[in-house]
Image: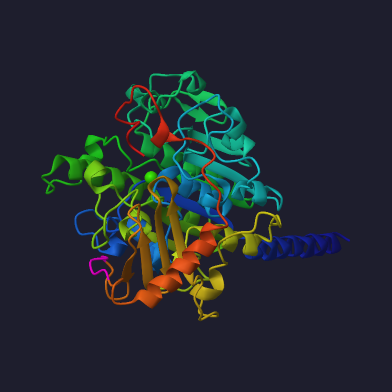
Amino acid sequence: MKINRIALIVVLTCLFQWSGYSQNAQKPNIIIILADDLGYADVGFNGCKDIPTPNIDRIATNGVKFTNGYVCFSVCGPSRAGLLTGRYPQRFGYERNPQYRPHDPNMGLPKEETTLAESLKQVGFTSGIIGKWHQGADISNHPLNRGFDEFFGHLGGGHAYFPELLTIKDSYAVENSEGESYKTWIMRNHEPIQTKKYLTDEFSDEAVQFVEKHQKESFFLYLAYNAPHSPLQATQEYLNRFPSIQDTKRKTYAAMVSAVDYGVGKLLDKLESLDLDKNTLVYFLSDNGGPEKDNSSDNGVLREGKSSIYEGGYRVPFAMQWKGTVKPSVYENPISSLDIFATIAALSKVPIKKDRPLDGVNMIPYITGKNKGLPHETIYLRKFDEKGYSVRNKDLKLVLKKDGVPQLYDLAKDIGEQNDIAQQYPEEVKKLEAIRKEWDSQLIEPIFKGLIMSKGKKTKEDNKE
Ligand code: CA
């Protein structure tokens, strides 16, 4: 009798473990690590020489390095709205950085849109966001009201890094001032808390704890560092890592990137020590290109930077790993941050609303080589206020600005967009112009005024996007 009981327990344990395994194999955990304003050439896997990023590079070495990875907008807020909804933000009028307005429910991500966290909730995931939200400071748009189960971070578009600079307890007491929003206490869910560490370290340690806490569940962690976005602030510990960089600005930026890298390392180590690394898909990318003059970032050969419709604005450092499933490789075809939602949706089988179709594709068949085609024939960008458009179709890219004079570049030969060939190829310009018009007809105008339209006294932060 006793033997039978032991046998039964063994069988049940095996069954339980097997079913748990198969369920997890279909639905890997998700971690999206988003850097803020990180230059294309500021990671080791894109050739950076003066800032070692061994841990961020681990993701690219373990998995896939994307050389043509795009985000859907060239400044923070709209880019993040696209990442979180899997849809071009220009479709729902999110085309400007939101102002910090804690009592304006319409300044932020429209409620009609579905976030990744809201979708994953329907299939049993626990979701957490650590870091920068920037999708609206009104409580109706608080992460906990947009599908996340846990929040540790700040609501606005940037933040001071040293705890002694965080002097405003109540995030909702700040009225329409970006500068003041940078000084608010960090929120844990709805509670303001007094932090003690350099902010990047706070976020990294919190991320490690999130994984530890939810290791037995299916989880989605959105680790949205505000680094290396300005203000340029770094601890001596990180500055000391760069004795040979003489330029103070670049040195501080390097220290900030190094802090992010250190945190990424701690998180990857935790996944490995808990034996979750094969069952967790990890993405790393920047929300837009580096604003080179502002934070001393470097987009390498790419033209211009943050806010631009040239490559430096929205082609970003982009890598992902899914150990055991996706083999190490380099993927050269254009992919989009919008593909992250579509990939997760396909793997997790989340329901997609018919009236809110996704703009991305499931990346997995492409990066495993099962599908040899292009994930996207065309990558789009519109910046409404500048009457600016970029339309990349295969390797040809149309750039249209306020002056209405089309520019054409062949990115296969001219990654730096130095040689405008519009005059030589009028037929190609016409073709791309037709593609642009067709896409444009699907978009709406911006639905809130945003940072760019803010009136009154402006602080340094108000002028930064
Ligand atoms: Ca940004």
Measured as percent of width and height from the top left, residue 377 is found at: 49, 72
322 sits to left or right of 76: right
Residue 292 in percent (x, y) is at 24, 48
Extreme-right residue of the structure: 1
Residue at 46% from the left image edge and 64% from the top image edge? 379
Q: Magenta segment, which residues?
A: 416-420
Residues 318 and 243: in front is 318
Q: Is residue 358 visible?
A: yes
Residue 419 is one of the magenta-drawn residues? yes
Q: Is residue 390 magenta?
A: no
Q: Which residue is nearer to you in this view: 168 or 200?
A: 168
Look at the image and tell me in which quarter the C terminus lies: top left
User: Please, which colouring scheme is shown?
Assistant: rainbow
* Residue at 85% across, 64% down: 4
Q: Quadrant of ligand 1?
A: top left
Residue at (22, 36) in percent of width and height = 236
**Is residue 276 in sight in this rendering?**
no
Q: Quadrant of the N terminus?
A: bottom right
| Left or right: 4, with 102 as reference point | right
The overriding secondary structure of the stretch rendered in magenta is loop
The quarter of the picture where residue 9 lies is bottom right
Q: Answer above or below: position of 165 versus 219.
A: above
Residue 68 locus on image (x, y percent): 38, 67
Q: Give the left or right position of residue 116, taking residue 432 as reference.
A: right
Q: Position of residue 102 (x, y in %)?
A: 52, 25
Above or below: residue 457 compared with residue 354? above
Q: How many marks?
A: 0
Q: Is residue 457 above or below residue 287?
A: above
Determine which quarter of the picture holds residue 355: bottom right
Q: Quick one: 266 or 2, which is closer to the camera? A: 266
